[in-house]
Amino acid sequence: MRTLSSEVAKHISESIEVKGWLHKKRLLGGVTFINVRDRGGLVQVVIKDKTEVEKLRGLQIGTVLKVEGQVVEEPRAPGGAELHDAKLEVLVPVEFESPIEIDKPLSHESENLETLLDYRVVGLRNLREQAIFKVQAAVKEAARSYLRGQDFTEFNSPKLLPGATEGGAEVFKLDYFGKEATLAQSGQFYKQIMVGVFERGFEINPTYRAEPSATTRHMTEFMHIDAEMGFVDLEELLDMMSGLMNSVIDDVWTKGETHLKIWNAAKPLMLKQIPQITMAEIHEKYSASTGTNTVGEKDLRPDEERWICEWTKKELKSDAVFVTEWPREGAKFYHKFKDDDQQVAERADLLFRGVEIATASMREHRYDKLVTQLRGMAGGDPENIGFKYYLDAFKHGMPPHGGFGMGLERLTQKMLGLRNVKEASLFPRDINRLAP
RNA sequence: GGGCUCGUAGUGAAGUUGGCCUAUCACGCCUCCCUGUCACGGAGGAGAUCGCCGGUUCGAAUCCGGUCGGGCCCGCCA
């Protein structure tokens, strides 16, 4: 019967068996300490028998072991207990030296990012690296749990699409049995279609952007938390997002404490309702404060995003802020514009600790108007197969609705205080990385 | 796509106004010593044609040109 490392302390004085990977060895002469890693964490094994120690000669970190031993309560041991009188069995010997050391913190300096990512396969075995993805898994679970609790139904939409796209970002093109297909840049069309089915729906899936962006916040493939809901207005949509963010952060900080502690992650300051600031207001504040005039610009500069987050944190005690009142210029064809001002899109971007982690908007739900906007704003052909099926949903009745797309890696990155979004991706894809 | 910057053992760094470099240190690896380590400690050892190509020079890790590969910022976005 195998016992997990995390359960060892519950078996004091019992003889147990653990299985896992050799994580660290310390040979002190008469006594040898090894750490064995399994899914529960690490357990320390004390070996005094020379013939047992000899079994490890020439074997490297990563060697897969079975260890039988007596559990002894020991305050000097990590976890308060350890295995004595160990009998080792090498299940899988490893003779190759690990390219990077996994028992101590790996460098996350930007100049060493290449090494970190090149050796990801073994590097992820580092408990500190692992913690990032434990947190990420917790974020996903928390988001799912909250959205399900709000009557959202989870679905999966296809990522292989016909040519037509929502516009905005560059898309990957590929050969599809002689036709041209694209990789989805978001679940946009499908999640809207699903409003007509479930009313409230969401998916957590990868999406693709062929943007040649080389920054600390871009990847060509990333995980999107895509949600859409019917019969709401923008305020109700933003309330839902406030609820989601608060719930996710509370959940993660409740259940993932050990992993957050490894990164000294401070719990984000959150208000029940995430504050809203209009883009014009941000431009004014930023310009007045920094002397760089951005008034009238149609978007926020990255520096403005960082600045307003600092301001919001200091003045409003919130690490999150919604940027509202986006100009029509730069809007997408499916966006809805204010009834009393067609120059303003009913859109809000969620900034979190200096970076944009989500975009929300109300969508134009009236068929005729949507077709007009498709033609006028995107130059799209409503008869194009890629738009036709989408428009059909509207033809057959769509309520006022809105939704958001949130970047899972960016959220994880900012929760943990990582500097590059790629650090929050298991196997990141960017303009010059396709492996591992 | 534009700008800036970097490239030295498996890993992380020092050296980069040319000669003292036969390239230094730390971690890891190998051998030996060590009975409470947890970044164990001690002694010894192996491991680098200084990204690559070309040039200048008596002499190049160091200077020049090219090239390849990273990183950061901007544009764009999640």
Image: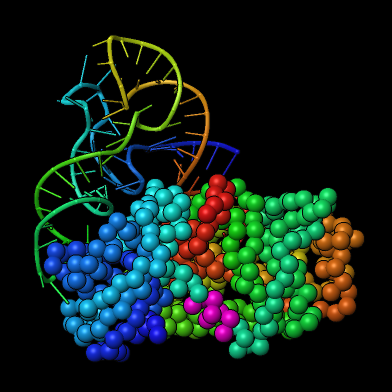
Q: Please, what is the dominant secondary structure of the magenta stretch? A: helix
Residue B14's x, y, as percent? 24, 39
Residue A116 visible (yes or no):
yes
Question: Which quarter of the picture shows residue A219?
Answer: bottom right
- Relative to residue A391, is residue A435 drawn left or right? left
Q: In this picture, is B55 found above or below B52?
A: above
The x and y percentages for residue A209 are 64, 55
Q: How many marks?
A: 0
Question: Where are the magenta residues, as a range?
Answer: A138-145
Residue A53 is inside the magenta segment: no
Name the outermost residue toward the front: A51
Residue drawn where x is 32% and y is 66% of the image: A23
Q: Is residue A140 above or below residue A107?
A: below
Q: Is residue A386 above or below residue A255?
A: above
Answer whether residue A245 is visible to the viewer in this image.
no
Q: Position of residue A77 (x, y in %)?
A: 21, 78
Quadrant of res A414? bottom left
Seen at 60% across and 89% down, the residue is A149
Q: Point out the residue furthest to the right here.
A: A383
- Is A370 on the left-hand or right-hand side of A35? right
The chosen color scheme is rainbow
Q: Work out whether residue A163 or residue A310 is closer to the camera in this orientation and state it.
A: A163
Quadrant containing the N terminus of chain A is bottom left
**Residue in front for this viewpoint, A236 or B72:** B72
User: Residue A337, percent across and down?
Assistant: 73, 69
Left or right: residue A166 versus residue A203 is right
Above or below, A135 relative to A433:
below
Is A143 inside the magenta-drawn segment?
yes
What residue sits 52% from the left and 59% below the top?
A427
**Left or right for B52, reference A389:** left
Q: Residue at x 46, y 83 (%)?
A: A251
